């Protein structure tokens, strides 16, 4: 999937990981997405790569305590994209 496709998916789900920090499953439920692989590949990984979201335990990405939260860049991106709706 190209960058345009990733941005389109993120725009459709602009609340990828709202504050406060959420686990992967909490964020997935909040976005009403059922497939774990779909959520991870189409939303979470691109948001991490674009630095819109960051891990609370970055040195242990597979930790059972792992949560995700919006970066300042992510908060700004969400605000801009909500204004465009």
Image (cartoon, rainbow, N blue to C red):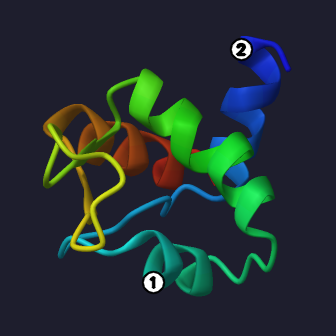
| Quadrant where the image shows the N terminus | top right
Name the residue: 73% across, 43% down.
Answer: 42
**From the viewer's perspective, is residue 70 above or below residue 8?**
below
Name the residue: 58% across, 45% down.
Answer: 84
Residue with the mark numbered 2: 3
Number of numbered tags placed on the structure image: 2
Q: Position of residue 12 (x, y in %)?
A: 72, 54
CA gap between label 1 and label 2 equals 25 Å
Q: Position of residue 44 (x, y in %)?
A: 54, 47
Q: Is residue 78 left or right of residue 38?
A: left
Q: Is residue 53 left or right of residue 73?
A: right
Badge 1, how many Cα within 10 Å: few under 14, some, many 20+?
Answer: some
Badge 2, how many Cα within 10 Å: few under 14, some, many 20+?
Answer: few
The quadrant where residue 7 appears: top right
Residue with the mark numbered 1: 26
- In the picture, the disc for residue 84 is none
Q: Position of residue 21 (x, y in %)?
A: 21, 70
| Quadrant where the image shows the C terminus | bottom right
Q: Earlier in the sequence, mark 1 or mark 2?
A: 2
Farthest-out residue, top: 2
Question: In the structure shown, which secondary structural element does the residue marked by tag 1 occupy?
Answer: helix
Q: Is residue 52 left or right of residue 69?
A: right
Q: Position of residue 74 (x, y in %)?
A: 31, 40
**From the viewer's perspective, is residue 69 above or below residue 48?**
below
| Mark 1 or mark 2, whichever is nearer to me | 1
């Amino acid at each position: 999937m190209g960058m345009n496709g990733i941005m389109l998916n993120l725009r459709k789900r602009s609340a990828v990981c709202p504050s406060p920090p959420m686990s992967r499953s909490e964020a997935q439920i909040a976005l009403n997405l059922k497939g774990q692989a779909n959520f991870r590949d189409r939303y979470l990984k691109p948001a991490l790569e674009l630095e819109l979201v960051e891990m609370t335990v970055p040195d242990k990405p597979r930790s059972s305590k792992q949560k995700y939260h919006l970066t300042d860049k992510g908060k700004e991106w969400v605000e801009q994209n909500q204004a465009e709706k």
